Image (tube, rainbow, N blue to C red):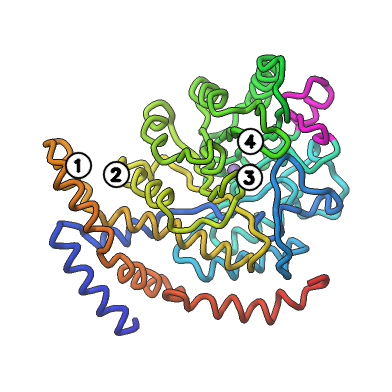
Amino acid sequence: MRQDVARNYEEAKKLYEQHGIQVDEILTELERIKISIHCWQGDDVRGFLFRDQELSGGISVTGEYPGAAGTPEQLRADLEKAMSLIPGSHKVNLHAIYADTEESVDLDQLEPKHFQSWVDWAKVQGIGLDFNPTCFSHDKSRDGFTLSHADPAIRQFWIDHCKASRRIGAYFGEQLGQTCVTNIWIPDGYKDIPVDRLAPRQRLKASLDEIFAEEINPDWNLDAVESKLFGLGSEAYVVGSHEFYMGYGIQNNKLICLDAGHFHPTEGIAGKLSSLALFTEGLLLHVSRPMRWDSDHVVIMDDELIEIGRELVRNDLLGVTHIGLDFFDASINRIAAWVIGTRNTIKALLRAKLEPTETLKQAELEGDYTTRLAFMEEFKSYPFGAVWDYYCERMGVPVREEWLSEVKRYEQDVLLKRFGS
Ligand SMILES: C[C@H](O)[C@H](O)[C@@H](O)C(=O)CO
Ligand SMILES: [Mn+2]
């Protein structure tokens, strides 16, 4: 243990302990929190199944930073490098297009065997896997509709893909001993104002009912549904809106996924957690950063992230919340993107845990809003950074910005040597 890090930690601890905040215990709790790291930051959401398909579905990756992973082996190596710089043991979130197979197989025919290399790898890493059907970047989603498509044959293709995805998720859960969350997001929607908003939603509801009809052990797989307000090309209407999935999820006992970029530009998700928690058995988050639109920028320590951390901690929601990341930036080193976004997410949780929650709640209850405001403001400059540094050192990952030189070295030794970089 580095002496400067240990010394700063001891000083910080004294300050927090004056307020009854048990820092050592908090660090033990922090170790247990898993963040689901999204594989798609590593290759700009291209996947391996259909390398010639353009990214579609109203999402977009911009930037030409060299070194994107081009094979499953490269993507896994990059994830390993990122995870070696992030404290704790986490999960990796896969999309169906990341199947690792020589077979030419379409989405509706996917089986667990097409992901065996991922499972083997996850076992070696000691991590869990999460999963997502890929309802975009495919010939059958070219007109922007999938599970709500008016053509029953196309709809059936996507239903079968989602059914296959749940079985793959269950296989992950069973093999790895960690529940897999399989999250359904579809891009379906209209660019311009529709006449019939109801019929596509009726079809989506019927498709979901068929997808979820098969009973799957909830210890292996949990289903989630992800809403959206608008996308590129679906500005006027999205079938799977927040209201739609909130209703569906509550009625059918599914996790409701809140993506931080899927609401009105100034609308945050933090304030929604306490309401949803009262009516659902669990939540899934896609921690992202919208900038003017659902731009999926790398997560930074901004007000929204701090507030999400606080809501999870203050309301004791960490036990029922699956925290996933969802951003993709190709204008910077992709491993750095993972490291920055994941470290920030964990750091925001630590920061929230280091607040005097009981004191704040008591002050609020007593109507002493002066104390509430004073404490909230003063704690913003308490030395949580010293606690974070100690946590990183204790977990065997680089302290502060020291991780960056590792990433730069990997870029020189590995990323820039990749074909096409
Ligand atoms: C690739 C992801 O599944 C996708 O980003 C989805 O979760 C989403 O947020 C779409 O806007
Ligand atoms: Mn998302």
Q: Amino acid at mark 1?
A: Lys
User: Mark 1 — residue?
Assistant: 361
- The nearer-to-camera label among 4 and 2 is 2
- The nearer-to-camera label among 2 and 3 is 2
Counting from the top left corner in percent of width and height, residue 69 is at 73, 64
Mark 2 within 8 Å of ligand 2, using the beta carbon: no
- Marks 2,3: beta carbons within 8 A: no
Specify few, some or many for label 3: CA neighbours under 10 Å numbering under 14, 14-19, or 20 or more: many
Q: Where on the picture, by quarter, is residue 16?
A: bottom left
Checking the image for residue 408, the label placed there is: none
Q: Nearer the viewer, residue 8 or 371?
A: 371
User: Mark 3 — residue?
Assistant: 131
Q: Quadrant of the N terminus?
A: bottom left
Q: Amino acid at mark 2?
A: Arg
In space, the residues marked 1 and 2 are separated at their CA atoms by 9 Å
User: Mark 4 — residue?
Assistant: 184
In space, the residues marked 1 and 3 are separated at their CA atoms by 37 Å
- Marks 1,2: beta carbons within 8 A: yes
* Vertical side of 202 occupied by 39: above or below: below
Q: Amino acid at mark 4?
A: Ile
Q: Quadrant of the C terminus?
A: bottom right
- Marks 3,4: beta carbons within 8 A: no
x 71%, y 61%: residue: 63
- The nearer-to-camera label among 1 and 3 is 1
In space, the residues marked 4 and 2 are separated at their CA atoms by 29 Å
User: Mark 2 — residue?
Assistant: 314
Element marked by disc 4: strand
In space, the residues marked 2 and 3 are separated at their CA atoms by 29 Å
